[in-house]
Every structure is written in structure tokens, then in C-alpha cells.
Image (cartoon, grey):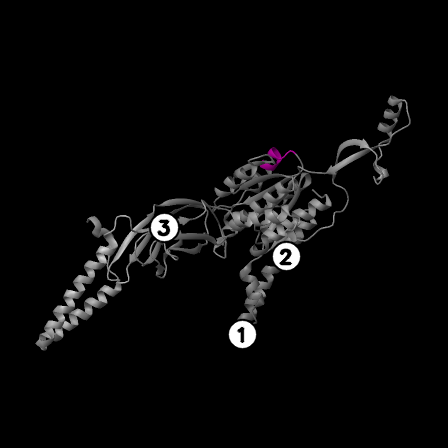
Amino acid sequence: MGPFRDLFLPARFFQVGTALVVVFVVAFFWPPLLWAAKAMAFALAVLLLADALLLWGTRKGGLVATRAVEDKLSMGDENEVALNVENRYGTPISARIIDEAPVQFQKRDTGDLLPLAARGAEGARQRRTYSLRPTERGVYGFGHLNLFAATPIGLINRRFRAVPPQEVKVYPSIIQMRKYAFLAESNRLEEAGLKRVRRLGQTMEFDQVRTYVPGDDRRTINWKATARRGMASGGGPSLLVNQYEEERAQPVVAALDMGRAMRSPFEGITLLDHAVNTSLVLLNTALIKADKAGLVTFDHEVRTVVAPDRGRGQLSRVLESLYRQRPSYRDPSYEAFYAAVRSRLKRRSLILLFTNFDTRAGLERQLPYLARIARKHRLVVVLFENSGIRELLETPAERLEDVYVKTTAETLAMEKREIARTLERRGIGSILTSPEHLTVDAVNRYIALKARGSF
């Protein structure tokens, strides 16, 4: 096909061609119009030739474009894709853009005509952005970035393929993680809805012995060290005090139930994916607070165990592990989960278990394993409210049928609350929350427990 493979005929060409055909048809019945029809056909041929020469006749001309997109997209968030277009023709050009977005979005993004001035003039470059919201983790493939150039004549379009295909990976919500990380590092977490918790008690570890200075708490004076120093120096005693630092390196573990109950969707993504996003934020916040971050995932068997650590690369290990998680169609085995916790977590840890018990009977079957874990670790079970039930309860009942539906919905909501109360009575912490408030509530609980020294 040669250069013709990039030749496309726009709507204007067919509109002009249709008008010309109409003129020739009328000239068949009224011959004096034939000369005008022939003149119009000749003019059309000249314009087509001029249009083609403008688009293909220059060696250095053309459209150049780039696509700016992160190599790691954030699941469940709006990710910006920027397209930069430059006109290297010596004449003003209009360009229509079609970016071949990943097939998962079922989207061919066509922009309005972008007016581009001649090369070197102001306006020769344009920037256009659009956003993509992926709802599944995995590899996404972008195709070509297609540009359709048109001169002011507008009878022919020339296609440019400016960007080759590329692949990007969709990870758990990196955007959300960065937001919370910035707020945590600047001590502004309350801006994200987190509560400021007053520290109760002491979670301090001994650091060193140093010389007493005015203002030190006299309860920290180390009398034995002071006496030994006085006897060794032969002079008067110089008071020594114990210096403490905040207890750090406490293990924080996110445990993800990947069973079929976590496949329920909310706002386009599953409950498991909401839990995955929250786990990334929670564990990154723990690392910023100098604690150790760990991960356990399980369905009918244990899938992943990332031992709690705070070293370099731990966040990357957690991120890659979360990236690979997929929900199962099978029921989770809490016996396998308990065995993994008992064998792999030797030190007392804060474990936030993201799961979804719908009935008390379902909880009762697993409660013995949860109780055993809670004897050695600080266990908090995160449960999801049913957003559909919540909407039913908020909708006014207008018919008798609606009353029955609302009564059933209230029964289910009460059972969910009773599940949370049952856990609390057994010494197991619980969080009953909606997916949209999951991250704030989970991080709030971690900060509150850390402030109270309740690990």
C-alpha cells in the first residue's frame, strides 16, 4: 500500500463528493449545468492534490507526539495519561488523537481537533490529558498513539503512529499510599480523617544511661549506676539517669482472607481489592512509624507469608506480594491461617484480619482459631458492611412490600453488628466499616493501639 496505508478520508471529503454527484445528476437533466459540474470536479482534483502535497510533500514535516504514563498504575484511582503533540509542518495543522488504551477499559479515546500552529510559532505544541481507572490488578497493554493530521483544506487526513505499544502494571493503590505517607511523615494524618490520639501509658524502651540535667524526671535516676560512678571517681556523686526511647519495631501484620466472600464488588472493584489497597497504606504507615510490616494471605490454604521486617526493600516485597493476589472461589481455611501465624510469627504482633463473615454461624465455626490467635497476638478483625443493605435502610418504605424488605435488611444489619460484638466479647478487636471508610478506620485503629501501647 505504501503511503496510502496512512491515507484516510474524513467526512468533509464525502460531503463534497456527494454535492458533486448531485450536481452531475442535475446536469444530466439540465445540460447547461454540465460545464459547472466539470469545473467543480477539476477544482476538487486540484484541492486533493494540494492537500496531499501539504501532508506528504515535506521531508522534515509531520506530527510528533509522546505519551506520558506511569509504569505502575494505581488500582481504583484515576490515573492521568498525558499526550504531548508537536507540529513540525511549515503550515498550521489540525490533529485528531486516538490513543489505543488497554482493552480492559474498552475505550478508544478520540479527542476533538487540536489546532496546531506552524512549526516554531506559538501554539505549535499542545498537551492533552485523560484519566483511566483500572479495577483489576495485572498487566495492561497500550497500543499505538494515532494522530490524524489535516490541513485547512481538510479533504484528506494523514495518520501518524507516534508511540509504539507499551505495557504497564496495575498495582494496589500507590496514589493512596503516597498520600498517607506524606501526611504521616509530616504529622498531618488528621487531614485524611484520622483521629489524633493522646498517648496513654508508656511504650518506652531503655536506650542508655546519661548524666542528669535540670528538668529530667527524677523517677528516671539510676541510683545504682550513680553510686558505682561515685565510688570509681572517688569524688561526689554525679547523678545518672536512664534515657528511654519510644518502643519501635513492633510487628504489624495485614492478613487477607481471599475466599469467595471477598469477591463481592463495590464501586467496580472487589472487597479483596479494597482490602489490598488498605493493607498497602497500613503497612507503609507502619514502616514510616518505624514498626515492622508483614503480610499473610490465605484461602483454602496459605498463599503468601511475608515475615515482618522494616529493612530496605520490605515495602517492595509487600507491594509485589499484594500485586499477585487473586480472590478464590473456595471457602477460607482458618485452621491453615492459624498454623501459619503460630509457626511464622514468634513475636507478639498486631494482626489486622480483613475478612467478611455474613452470619454468626459462619463466625462460630472459625471462632476457636481466632481465639487461639488472640491469646498470643493482638488480633483485630475487619468486617465489611453491606452497602446494598445500607441503601435499603435509608430508602423510605412506600409500599407494604418495602416494609418487608426493610425488615429483612435490618435483620441482616443487626446480625453483622452482633458478629462484631461477639468478637469483642471474646477479646478480639473488631472494625465494622464500609469499603469507602476502610482505609481511614484501619489506620485509625493501628495508631490508637500504638499510642496506648496495646499491641
Q: CA distance from mark 3 to mark 1?
A: 59 Å
**Residue depicted at 60% across the width and 39% down the height:** 293
Q: CA distance from mark 2 to mark 3?
A: 55 Å
Q: CA distance from mark 2 to mark 1?
A: 27 Å
Closer to the chain start, of discs 2 and 1, is: 1
Name above or below for residue 57 compared with residue 233: below
Mark 3 belongs to which amino acid? Ala
Q: Main secondary structure of the magenta part?
A: helix
Mark 2 belongs to which amino acid? Arg
Magenta stretch bounds: 340-346
Name above or below for residue 20 compared with residue 202: below
Question: Can you see residue 72?
Answer: yes
Residue 349 in picture, x, y percent from top left: 65, 39
Question: Which numbered marker is on residue 65?
Answer: 3
Residue 403 in picture, x, y percent from top left: 57, 70
Question: Which numbered marker is on residue 399?
Answer: 1
Name above or below for residue 54 compared with residue 294: below
Q: Which of the two marks, 2 or 3, is nearer to us in this view?
A: 3
325 or 95: nearer the viewer: 95
Mark 1 belongs to which amino acid? Arg
Name the quarter where the C terminus is drawn. top right
Closer to the chain start, of discs 3 and 1, is: 3
Residue corresponding to mark 2: 417
Give the structural element (helix, strand or loop) at label 1: loop
